[in-house]
Amino acid sequence: MNEIKYLECHAYRHEWDEISVLKEPSFGVALDYRCTECHGIKRVIVSRQSGVVLSRYYKMSKDYRGPKGTTKADYRKVWVNKKLQKQRKLKAV
């Protein structure tokens, strides 16, 4: 697999920063977040009364998508191998 853009986001997790609500929802309370790495947006809508998550969705940039058919496990395998290579280099120093 060639160099994958935003590999850590695909393989492991996003690093979310809370941002101003982009658009008020018609129901519940919105919480909006932006990933510091890939700049994707996550929106969580929570019930004001119960605190239950009513909706959660993501809007990713067009260049976020990896090769067609690539699974989460494929991304993790590449990510883990890169981590191992980095650890070996650090031990060699």
Image: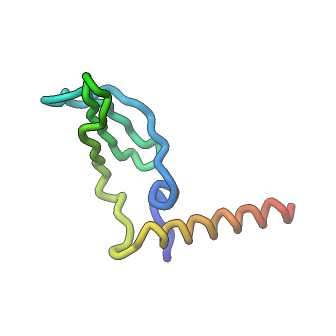
Q: Please tell me which residue is depicted at 28% across the width and 31% down the height of the picture.
A: 46
Q: Residue at x 49, y 61 (%)?
A: 11
Residue at 26%, 23% (x, y): give it. 48
Relative placement, left or right, of 42 versus 74 is left
Marker count (numbered): 0
Q: Residue at x 44, y 66 (%)?
A: 72
Describe the colour scheme in one phrase. rainbow
- In percent of width and height, residue 9 lies at 47, 54
Asked whether, in this view, residue 72 is left or right of residue 62, the answer is right
Q: In the figure, is residue 61 to the left or right of 93?
A: left
Residue reaching furthest to the right: 93
Q: Give residue 44's quadrant in the image.
A: top left
Is 79 above or below relative to 45? below
User: Is residue 93 depicted above or below 53 in this figure?
Assistant: below
Expressed as whole percent of the image width and height from the top left, the position of residue 39 reads: 39, 45
Q: Quadrant of residue 45?
A: top left
